[in-house]
Amino acid sequence: MARYPSSGVSYSFGPGALTPAVKVLIITNVVLFVLNLIVGDAMTLRLGLSPQAVFEQFALWQPFTYMFLHSTGGVGHVLINMLSLWMFGTELERTWGTRFFTKYYLITGIGAAATSLVLSLFIDGIYYSVTVGASGAIYGLLLGYGMYFPNRPIYLYFIFPIPARVFVMIVGAIAFLSALGGPGGGVAHSAHLGGLVVGYLYLKGLRGRPLDELKYRYLRWKMGRARNRFDVYSGGRSSDDDDWKSDWKKHIH
C-alpha cells in the first residue's frame, strides 16, 4: 500500500485542550445542572442567589453556590457559559497559573453576587428575584481576557471580528444600562456588571493586592514630603559643578 507524506498542516478549534481548573469547573457545573433537573425548584431556591434570603434568612452560602447552578428551562444557559469558560478561561489559566485563575474566578463570581445584593436595595425587582449561573464569573474572565489580550479578535455573533478590548467595552456598556433598568428577561444584568467591575478592580490592584498598592503609594508620598522638607534633589551634574571646575583649573594654571 502506498504511503503519502503528511502535509504538516493541522487544524484546531478554540484554545485547545481543557486546563485543570477549567475542566473541574465545567464538570461541576454540568453535574449540578443534571442534579438540579432531577431535584427541581427546591434546589434552585435553596442554592440560588436570593437577596431576600441572604438578608432576612442569613443564607450566606448563596453568593457562592449560585454560580454553579443554571436555569433548568433548557440547556442553552449552561452550554453558553461552559463554552465561554472554555474559550476564555483556558488561555487565562495557562497565562496566570491554576491557583491564581481559580482565585480570580471565585472572587469575580462572589463579587458579582455582592453587586446584585447591593443593587437589590435600590432597584425594584432584584430583591425578590433568584439568580443562578456562572455569568458573573464568566464576565470577569472576559474582562481579564480583554486586558491581557486586547487585540485578539472576538467574533460577534460568530461573524464580525472585533478586538477583545472593544468587545469588553460593548458588553460592559450593555450590562451597565441593563442593570439600571432592573431584571429583565430572566437575565441577571447586575451580576454581569459586577463581574466586570470586580474583575477590573482585582486585576488593577497589583493582581489582587490592593493593600500593597496603597502602601506603595503612601511610601512614595512620604518620600516626596521628606525630599521637599530637606531640599533633597536627584543626583546629576549641574552648572555649579562646571563653574567650580573651571575656577579650579584657573588656580592650577
Image (tube, helix red, strand yellow):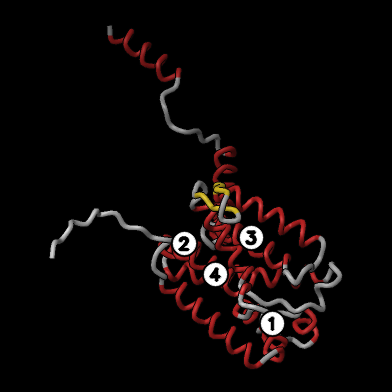
- Check disc 2 and report its element: helix, strand or loop: helix
Q: Give the distance between the C-alpha atoms of the residues marked 4 and 1, in whole angstroms.
A: 18 Å
Q: Give the distance between the C-alpha atoms of the residues marked 4 and 2, in whole angstroms.
A: 11 Å
Q: Residue 239, position in %: x, y?
A: 45, 17
Q: Is residue 36 left or right of residue 90?
A: right
Q: Residue at x 36, y 11 (%)?
A: 246
Q: Residue 16, position in %: x, y?
A: 40, 64
- Check disc 1 and report its element: helix, strand or loop: loop
The disc at residue 196 is: 3
- Check disc 3 and report its element: helix, strand or loop: helix
The disc at residue 92 is: 2
* 101 lies above or below 7: below
For discs 4 and 1, the disc positioned in front in the rendered view = 1
Residue occupied by mark 4? 105
- The answer to whether mark 4 and mark 2 are in CB contact below 8 A is no
Picture quarter containing residue 51?
bottom right
- The answer to whether mark 4 and mark 1 are in CB contact below 8 A is no
